[in-house]
Structure formats: structure tokens, C-alpha cells
Image: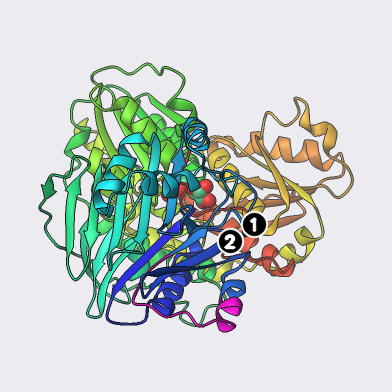
Amino acid sequence: MCGIIGYIGKSQAKDLLIDGLRRLEYRGYDSSGIAVRDNGELCVLKAKGKLDNLIGKLEERSFSGTCGIGHTRWATHGAPDELNAHPHLSRSGKFAIVHNGIIENYKELCDMLISQGYSLRSETDSEVIAHLIELGYDGDALKAIQKTVKLLKGSFALGILCADENALFAVKKDSPLVIGSGEDGIYIASDMQALLSKTHEFLLLESGEMAKITDKAEIFDFDLRPVKRQVYVAENDKSDADKHGYAHFMLKEIYEQPEAIERTLLSQGELSFLDGIGSIHLIGCGSAYHAALMGKYIIESLTGIRVHADIASEFRYRNPIIKPDDLLIAISQSGETADTIGAMNIAAGKCKTACIVNVPLSSLTHVAEPMYTYAGPEIAVATTKGFTTQLVNLYLIAAKLLSNKGDSRVNELMTELSSLPLLVENVLKTVSPVKLAFLLAQNDYAFFIGRGADYAAAKESALKLKEISYIHADCYPAGELKHGTISLIQKGSPVIAIATDKQLLSKTVSNIAEVKSRGAFVIAVSPFDIDACDALIKIPYAKYVAPLLASVATQLLSYHTALVRHCEIDKPRNLAKSVTVE
Ligand code: G6P
């Protein structure tokens, strides 16, 4: 989703901005741009498509100045073209802004500006911000920005330049933005990750705060009352944002899973938020929702505690029934997903809340008790280690609930969990899906089936394939396929069946036979020898964690399929790593 970078200091801004935008690329974008303040004038350059297009244009122009802002745009309002790309200039060119979020009342604000004689150049909801600041400007940029933020409804992280002042302005409301203090100057960015090569010292803006940055950063609330903020020093993460010889971040992150899982297993605290709870709501979006769904099967079947799994964007608008002794756990790798935060806000004050989050101090951790995953930075848009470490936390939650009940199965579960890093390593060493990937790559669709927790694993596997290989994949509970969708099965239709549960094996095998007899080519992912299938991806046997192992196997299958199809694996088209608008 949109990325913001900003710099003010002693060095030339241009290269630092481009470097920052490079590091924000993983968030997903379809155009980019920068603005630099040069001798009291704001110079803007934008380009459609990849960052290289912007860099190409920069080579044709001189672009000097030590204060600037940059943006990668993921289109929401208006096509992904140069006109709609950020930064946006105000009418006279005195202000330039970059925005991440959505201005919900932009139509009213447009009408107001038009009645004042302004005309809008782009189709975006963001351009109004630049004009509004200019309209309220009487020589004090900070005041004009403050007047403007009071008019805006929605979510907005902003980087702003004023031609008259050698200063960088930042605003944060319900969208991520951090300030980083480096040796050569001060930066703003949508995430810490983008700045870790420059600094580990951050001032973390809270929602409803703004900053004026010169040779120091001054923070204010939206009423311009000064705010004091402690410096946060980010840890030096071992699994940094380099590919370390792997062809793609996704592959590197797949192979980092044994270590990430081990760190996550060893780093948990008391989990006291689980004491005395009634039922549990697990919410998330995308893969995090699939983790929630798997968590439902795992926790409910082991502990007998009712677990509801919900897609965050649905949960927040369906008047969910929340009881005071319920526990809502939001699951989010980034901790910044707008719908997940929105769903959390629905529950806040009504029941206990916690969150399973990977990014330290991200927005969700400010509103609910964090239970971190320790996956390290995840750069590939398609999550792998982020997802499996979320599952680890859900298994640990099940274990803690068993232990609270004095249920002795906790020992068996914990023993299996302690061997999980080795089991995953085993999958990574033994599963070699290249041949099957070539076969799958020739199709434009595939079906995934599974029962119980394997159904959740199958849903995640189907999403992974769709995301990175652009092969449409549909997923069904294995017993449900015959209720309609089986009409699509014909000779050669690829069906991937996940079957790790001994109790359900004969049922799933019957479902495999049903599609096979209609011509399907069935790939089973299982610890068991299944004669009915055409190909078997064999994974190690495990009583509890086998659906997680199956997910790792299908990550490899999806990766290799996307590779055969020459897809842009780390940055699939149209996708954003962290979706900060609803
Ligand atoms: C985006 C990503 C998905 C991810 C989802 C939730 O849609 O493309 O891969 O699963 O957001 O992200 P979160 O950071 O909340 O886990």
C-alpha cells in the first residue's frame, strides 16, 4: 500500500528519497514520485509504473535540494497514472503533499474548493489536502496544516513541504508513519523497515499527531499542543532485508521458517490474557484470516472453548455479538491493516483484546495486548514465515488453555511443538515440487480441498498460488466440492488435496476418488500413502502440527509454479503487503 518517505538534512535529498522508496517497494505500488525543495521552490517529478521509470526520468533532470518527500502510490481513487501519482502540488505550487490513507469527505472538500475558484487536476482524494493547506496559509505552514487536518475525515499519513520554509512536516491519523533520526538528517517513513539502513532511532508518532522537522523534530497534537516522545531504539534484526543469495525474498523467507518458528516458540511470556475467558474471536484479513480459521479448528477441537473466526472487514460491520468475558484476538503480520484495526476498535471496551502481530510497536499493539510472532522482517508480499509463526502462536494459545484446564495433553502438544522447527526443516529438505510445478503452471485454474484444519491450510495454499502465479484457485471443504463445483472437474483438472488428519483420512480419500473418477489430476499433500492420487507430496507425520507442515509444502509448490510462469514473485501485480485503507 502507499509508501511515504521524507528527508531533511545536510545531504542531497534525491538519492536518499529514491533509496527509501526502493525499501518501500515491497508494500505494493503502481506509480511513484518525489518533490524536493530547491532554493524556495518545490520541484516535482512523477512516473507511472515501476520506480525505475522515475529513476530514468530523474537522470534527464537536475534535482537538487536537501529537503524532500517521496511516495509510492497504490491506486484507490483514480487510475494508476502520472497525473494521479503523488506528490500533489497546491495551486500556486507553494505546498507539496504525499498521502497514505483515504479522505472520506474529499467530495465535499472538492466542492468547497471549487466554490473558492480552485480546480482539481487529478482524480485522487489526496489533492484537496494541498489546496486546503494553501487556502489556510497566512505565513505559518504548521498552522495551515493544523487547520486542514481538522477538516479531513478518514485516515491520513502525510508528508508535506512548504516552499517558504526549510522544514519537513508530518501528520499521522490512522495510517502508519514514523520519524527516524539519522547521522545526516531526519527522515519520515511509512515503516521503520525503510529506514533501518540509516538509523535505528525512532520517534513513533501516535494517531492524531503532527510534527515539524528542521534540525530537530517537534511533535504536536492536532490542537498544536507540544508532545514529548521518548526515542525508540529498534533492534538490529538478524534476518535483515537482503536476499542473501536467494533468487527471491519469498524463497528466503520460506527457508527462514525453522528459525522464525523456533524464535517464536521460545519468546512467549505468560499469556495471562487467556485467563478466565469465555469464547474467543479470531479476526484477520487475507492469510491472517486463514491463520484465524486454522486457529479455530485447533483451539476448539483441543480445548472445547468456542472460537469464532472472522474476516475483519465483515466482522466490523455486522454488529457482532461480543460478550464481556469474550477475548478478541486480531491477527496481523504488519499490525497496520485498516480493517483489522477497525474490527479491533469495535471490540475495544466490550471484551478483552489481544493481537498476534509481527511488526514491533505497530498500530495494533497500541490498542491490544501484543503476543508477537518473531518472524523478522517479511518483505515478499505473499506471506510465508509471517503466516506459520501466527499458527505457532495459536498452537501456544491452545497449549496454555489446556494447561489452565489441567489437561495432560498439553505435554504431548508442547513436545510436538518443540520439534516443529526440525519438522519444517525436514519439509524444506525433502519436498521437491518442481515437476509438479511445471504441470500446474500449464493450467489456468486449480482446486484445493481439505477437511478440518486441512481446509484452512488448503485455503491458504490456494491464496498463495493465486497471489503469485496468477492461476485461479478455488478451495472447498473436501466434502463440499460435490455440491456444485464438481461440475467444473474435467479431464486433467488439477485438484490439490491436503490430508493430514488420520481420523478424517478415509473421508478425504473418498473425495479424492470422486474427482479422480471425473478425470481430475490429484496431487495429495499428506504424511500417508494415498493410492487414489496421481502424485503425492509427502510430509512428515505429526499429530497436531501437520496442517502447518502442509502449508509449508504448498508454499514451495506455489513458489516453483510462479517461477515456471516467470511471474514477479515478490511483488505480484495489484497487491499490497499491508493494506492501510478499508
Ligand atoms: C494483504 C496482503 C496479504 C495479507 C493481508 C493481511 O492483503 O497482500 O498477504 O495476508 O494483507 O495483512 P496483515 O499485515 O494484516 O497480516
Pointer 2 residue: 31
CB under 8 Å between callouts 1 and 2? yes
Question: Which colour style is shown?
Answer: rainbow
Disc 1 residue type (three-letter) = Asp
Which label sits on residue 81? 1
Residue 410, percent from left and from top: 28, 41
Question: Callout 1: helix, strand or loop?
Answer: loop
- In this rendering, the answer to whether 458 lies above or below 63 is above
The residue at 73%/47% (across/down) is: 472
Which residue is nearer to you in this view: 386 or 263? 386
Residue 428 in percent (x, y) is at: 52, 67
Location of residue 117 with respect to 16 vertically, above or below: above
Residue drawn at (36%, 57%) of the image: 160
Asked if the beta carbon under badge 2 is closer than 8 A to the nearest atom of ligand 1, the reply is no
Of the residues shown, which amino acid type is indicated by label 2?
Ser
Say left or right for 412 vs 404: right
Indicate whether residue 58 is drawn in magenta.
yes
- Residues drawn in magenta: 55-69
What secondary structure is found at the residue carrying circle 2? Answer: strand
